[in-house]
Amino acid sequence: MTSTTDRLSSALDQIWEIPLQRPQVDLEQLGADIQHVPPYLWQERMLFHGAADQILQTLTTTFPRQARTSHPIFILQATARLAVLACPCTSSPGPWTYIPRNTRLEITGRIMDRTSFVLEDLSFPVPKDRQFTQNLSFWGRVPLDRLMRWS
């Protein structure tokens, strides 16, 4: 005989197993005109500029060491359930994956004006908070073959 708690737990498991699907939007059609992309359309390898250092420090507990004003963020993972994992980027060289200067970004065609290092070890779940996302400017999506490993 199953308890009420077991039945409730089973029902909740079934509810949470129903995947929320990301809308299928062809961002390529909008191209360079895109300035802001809502979080439910974020995809892996997207790059955004303008994440406030103060918020990044709260989310990562260690970054940045010296606050400027903002840093780019790189999207590591975007799941069907609308969860997003991101990390900050820096122009300070180190033993990290990096996006080389002069990389042409997908969707917008923007060219990276400097090498940007992806700080994967400082990843964080993107907060569902407009205060964090409202000032992010969409730069584009990094081509997979332009993610390089520092050697």
Image (cartoon, rainbow, N blue to C red):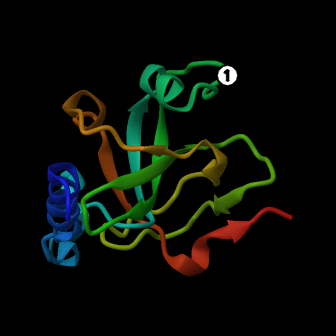
Location of residue 24 (image quadrant) = bottom left
User: For this view, does 124 lie left or right of residue 97?
Assistant: left
Q: Position of residue 84 (x, y in %)?
A: 36, 54
Q: Is residue 80 above or below residue 138?
A: below
- Where the C terminus falls, by quadrant? bottom right
User: For this view, does 44 lie left or right of residue 150?
Assistant: left
Q: Residue at x 59, y 74 (%)?
A: 146
Q: Residue at x 48, y 23 (%)?
A: 58
User: For this view, does 55 lie left or right of residue 96?
Assistant: left
Front-most of 128 and 140? 128
**Helix, strand or loop status at disc 1:** loop
Q: Is residue 49 visible?
A: yes
Location of residue 75 (image quadrant) = bottom left
Q: Position of residue 103 (x, y in %)?
A: 54, 68
Q: Residue at x 66, y 47 (%)?
A: 121
Mark 1 burial class by Cα count in 10 Å: few <14, some 14-19, many 20+: few
User: How many marks do you count on the picture?
Assistant: 1
Q: Is residue 129 above or below residue 5?
A: above
Q: Which residue is mark 1?
A: 65
Q: Position of residue 70 (x, y in %)?
A: 46, 29
Residue sitting at the far front: 1
